Image (tube, grey):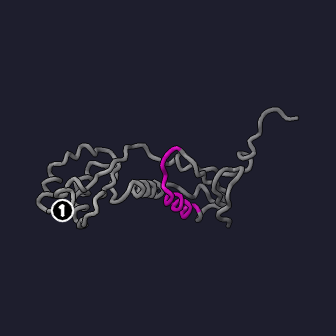
């Protein structure tokens, strides 16, 4: 009888990918546009521009920011664009939308820089559980990019992986 534990997953040549490994550090924060609305409901251009002018943009220094409006108000597109023009010089990334939209945009940037050719003709398992809040669209985009390279794509754990794609 052989001594020691044999890791059959390592011996199988399967590549296990946990998207947590791609997760960049950095604080994620929200910018709620409602604070710049008259009575929290109506955008009045002069008041909104004053609000933007008085905002301390250093609070957003080096952070990932998603801009949204929590009020059910009609917000012209230029208001989001104006905020972005002030956030861009200080923030790591600015996105209009939800926190999930922000995370998806961050991961798309990371995937753009990632060398997917390292998975050429490999059997890959993408793990689903992690410690970071990774939105489902990130897994879909990763699969989109991986499929051009991998021989086989599975989801889950090696002991119970769900087959997704086979070349």
Q: Looking at this rendering, what residue extends furthest in the top direction?
A: 3
Magenta highlight range? 131-146
**Which residue is drawn at the image coordinates 44% and 57% (left, top)?**
104
Q: Please say whether residue 56 is one of the residues in the magenta stretch.
A: no
Residue drawn at x 53%, y 46% is: 21
Q: Nearer the viewer, residue 2 or 51?
A: 51
Q: Is residue 135 highlighted in magenta? A: yes
Residue 144, image x, y percentages: 54, 64
Residue 91, percent from left and from top: 30, 49
Q: Residue at x 63, y 50 (%)?
A: 16
- Residue in the foreground of this view, choosing between 157 and 122: 157
Q: Quadrant of the N terminus?
A: top right
Q: Residue furthest left?
A: 46
Majority secondary structure of magenta residues: helix
Tag count in the figure? 1
Q: Residues within 10 Å of mark 1 (few under 14, many from 20)?
A: many
The residue carrying mark 1 is 43
**Residue 52 image position (x, y, % from top left):** 17, 53
Residue 63 relative to residue 148: left or right: left
Nearer to us in this view, 110 or 58:
58
Name the residue at 67% across, 67% down. Answer: 167
Q: Is 17 positioned to the left or the right of 67 in the image? A: right
Horizontal and vertical percent position of residue 75 = 24, 65
- Judged from the image, the secondary structure of the residue bearing numbered disc 1 is loop
């Amino acid at each position: 009888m052989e001594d020691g534990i044999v890791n059959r997953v390592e011996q199988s040549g399967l590549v296990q990918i946990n998207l947590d490994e791609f997760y960049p550090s950095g604080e994620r924060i929200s910018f709620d546009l409602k604070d710049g609305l008259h009575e929290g409901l109506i955008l009045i251009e002069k008041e909104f521009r004053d609000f933007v002018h008085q905002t301390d943009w250093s609070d957003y220094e080096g952070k990932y920011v998603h801009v949204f409006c929590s009020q059910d108000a009609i917000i012209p597109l230029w208001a989001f664009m104006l905020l972005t023009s002030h956030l861009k010089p200080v923030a790591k990334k600015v996105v209009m939308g939800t926190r999930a939209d922000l995370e998806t945009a961050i991961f798309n940037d990371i995937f753009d820089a990632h060398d997917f050719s390292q998975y050429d003709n490999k059997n890959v398992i993408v793990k689903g559980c992690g410690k970071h809040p990774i939105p489902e669209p990130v897994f879909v985009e990763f699969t989109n990019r991986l499929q051009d390279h991998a021989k086989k794509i599975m989801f889950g754990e090696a002991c119970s992986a769900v087959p997704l794609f086979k070349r």
